[in-house]
Image (cartoon, coloured by chain):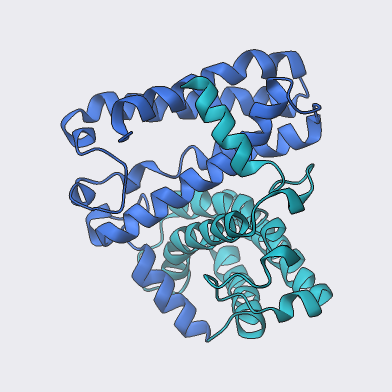
Chain colours: A blue, B cyan
Amino acid sequence: MKRNLVAAALAVSLGGVAGFAAAQAKPEVLVKQRQAVMTLQGKYFGPIAGMASGKVPYNADAVARNATYLENLSQMAWDGFHEATRDEKNTRALPKIYAEKAKFDDYAQRLQAETAKLGQLARAKDEAGVKKQFPAVLNTCNGCHDDFRSK
Amino acid sequence: MKRNLVAAALAVSLGGVAGFAAAQAKPEVLVKQRQAVMTLQGKYFGPIAGMASGKVPYNADAVARNATYLENLSQMAWDGFHEATRDEKNTRALPKIYAEKAKFDDYAQRLQAETAKLGQLARAKDEAGVKKQFPAVLNTCNGCHDDFRSK
């Protein structure tokens, strides 16, 4: 079993991770991995959105934890947007990502930077700061989705 | 669009996250979220497995980054194993998880503890320590899969 899990993990993972060439991972695996990141970003961003917008009572510990997860997650999707995935069908990511890679990469950098700021404020239990920073994260998500995701 | 993303994120996420009652999230959403965690754990564990077992040249920076991601990811799946998901079909998780919850929770605690140790060693660039700690993480994964995942 030990050997099996290592073998399976290696087969799936080598290439999808920095330090390895992304071209080694199968395109459908890259799509699955980047969609997993989006799913988890939604899981942890949702409650922050609810609390930052006042729809849900503010819980500083939950915000600190979620924002730290988001800071990590915001780094995980990008190597999955490899040109080898351009023709994959099971994705809403538009092929123009690869024609406008600099613009796409700029969104990726901005998301990481804005999420890092949110994490810092959240861990400092700075509720006012979180509420002020939250729209910067949201606008980056929405900007990239508007430009590079099918409706 | 801003409002839409918040609304969608809230609809999906409230309840799946600590600080909220998990019962509020739909069972199929909980399954999707926990499977996303497993997918990403595979993505980041695979290269560590390859390097720790000597199959791939050791890259201390990649190990430090991957192990830190794993330390975060190892905390994310557990609230998704809610009893409401017991009868979900699109999962290999066995219903006996909920009959043997203490044993399952022990695996969850061990994975988080062993992964935290791995992260600490990896960030200290302690290659020998990582190679010694890696089997403890692997054995925890495999133990839980053997006991609680269908073959």
User: Where residue A101 sits: x, y (%)?
Assistant: 23, 30
Residue A16 seen in the figure: no
Quadrant hosting residue A54: top right
Q: How many marks?
A: 0
Report the residue at 63% width, 53% height from top. B71
Instruction: State left or right for residue A23 relative to residue B109.
Output: left
User: Where residue B51 sits: x, y (%)?
Assistant: 43, 66
Report the residue at 76% width, 28% height from top. A56
Q: Looking at this view, name the residue that lies furthest to the right.
A: B102
User: Where residue B91 sits: x, y (%)?
Assistant: 55, 71
Residue B7 seen in the figure: yes
A20 up-or-down from B93: above or below: above
B92 up-or-down from A85: above or below: below
Report the residue at 64% width, 53% height from top. B26
The quarter of the picture where the C terminus of chain A appears is top left
Report the residue at 46% width, 22% height from top. B1
User: Where residue B13 sits: x, y (%)?
Assistant: 63, 42
Instruction: State left or right for residue B134 relative to residue B79.
Output: left
A71 up-or-down from A52: above or below: below
